[in-house]
Image (cartoon, rainbow, N blue to C red):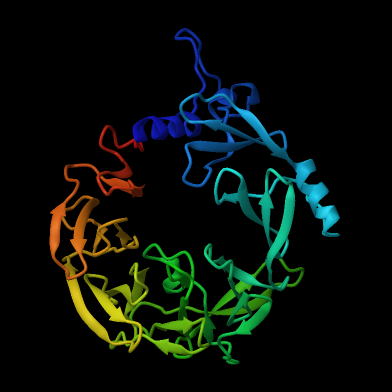
Amino acid sequence: MKNILLLLIIAFLLPSAIFSQDKKLTIEDASYMNRSIMPKSISGLKWMGSTALFSFNEDNEVMASKATTAKPFRLFGLDDINSSLKKLEEDTLRRLPSFRWLDDNSAYFTAGNKVYFYNISSKQIRELNDYPEEAANTDLDENTYAMAYTIENNLYIAFEGRHIQITHDDKPEIINGQTVHRSEFGISGGTFWSPRGNYLAYYRKDESMVSNYPLVDVDARIAELNNIKYPMAGMTSHEVTLGIYDVGSGKTRFIKTGEPAEQYLTCVSWGPGERYVYIAVLNRDQDHMKMNKYDIRTGNLVKTLFEEKSEKYVEPEDDLIFLNNEKEQFIWISERDGYRHLYLYNTEGELVKQLTSGEWIVRSLLGIGPKDKFAYFTATKESPLNSDV
């Protein structure tokens, strides 16, 4: 069943134009300037919660289908959403928002600076949360619908009608809740909600010791000089720490990641029980990584689960993916044998087994089956030009 569902996704996401063997492509054809032969794609394709239904968008309508039949039927349209918004005296939308399904009858979405819940059967909308219009780096917890966000360099959360300021740094060199290490090592955000939304981990970056680097803005009518913080090779880099904010108590504790302060902190991952946080700590030379387990109650290091070293470089980029039932086990992605592969570990740092191997790479881990029997991933096993499931 899982194979059928995954193949169905591939069929939707990877359509291609078909040409007869005797037809030659022109430059316009090859560069997609000829729109008549452009590959067709499906917008908004996603599973509807944990059901066997998937949805997609078509002409401002949300359609759905069973994976086993692929016979689409209409769920609702932009007109339905706008009609419900008007009843709440809210602004209407010009296009369909991106939905996250809770089940086959309800979903939530963000529009403007608000989070809404939508019920398909009743066609009713209710507001779940709101946050300031100037908010940036937004991060929604899908359990409590609390929204983490930043304004300038400080971190806030919007929760149960309250807007709570977590950090109070007034120096421009101190930045909270944003990406660090120039977005290397797979870092794409600066906040990390715990599995049940009781805690929020966040990066705090101190650039006060980093020298300014001048950049010229040539777009202005008269060129302007703007300084950024940039650590030149061999010079002092910024320092990063990880804070843990307790939503219930309003208190923050920082993880004791130790020295040197210029080390990289990445692959921040919560354990399923919300007691431990895992961090890949990489030295500035980028040739020695430690996977560390920390107790959030004290901030102390519990233990180093394993280490990776290389004469060239080590590049940790992926979070730990814990199993659904065996919650003391997780999958780690590593290039330790020269190729990017999956490894199964337990939370004591013991390697259970290597899951994939060979002269090919795993591109991404899509997920783990509900009974922990199968892991789904994309890889280049068939061809380095492909990304097969």
Answer left or right for 320 relative to 358.
Answer: right
State the residue at coordinates (32%, 46%): 369
In the image, residue 288 above or below residue 17: below
Answer left or right for 256 relative to 228.
Answer: left
In the image, residue 72 above or below residue 269: above
Answer left or right for 332 relative to 155.
Answer: left
State the residue at coordinates (27%, 32%): 382
Answer left or right for 308 relative to 244.
Answer: left
Q: Nearer the viewer, residue 238 or 342?
A: 342
Q: Quadrant of residue 235?
A: bottom left
In the image, residue 232 above or below residue 16: below
Q: In which quarter of the image is residue 344?
A: bottom left
Q: Which of 285 and 190 is in front in this view?
A: 190
Report the number of numbered marks: 0
State the residue at coordinates (14%, 61%): 351
Instruction: Tell me where residue 343 appears, x and y as whole percent.
Output: 20, 55
Instruction: Tell me where residue 92 appears, x and y as whole percent.
Output: 81, 52
Which quadrant does the C terminus fall into? top left
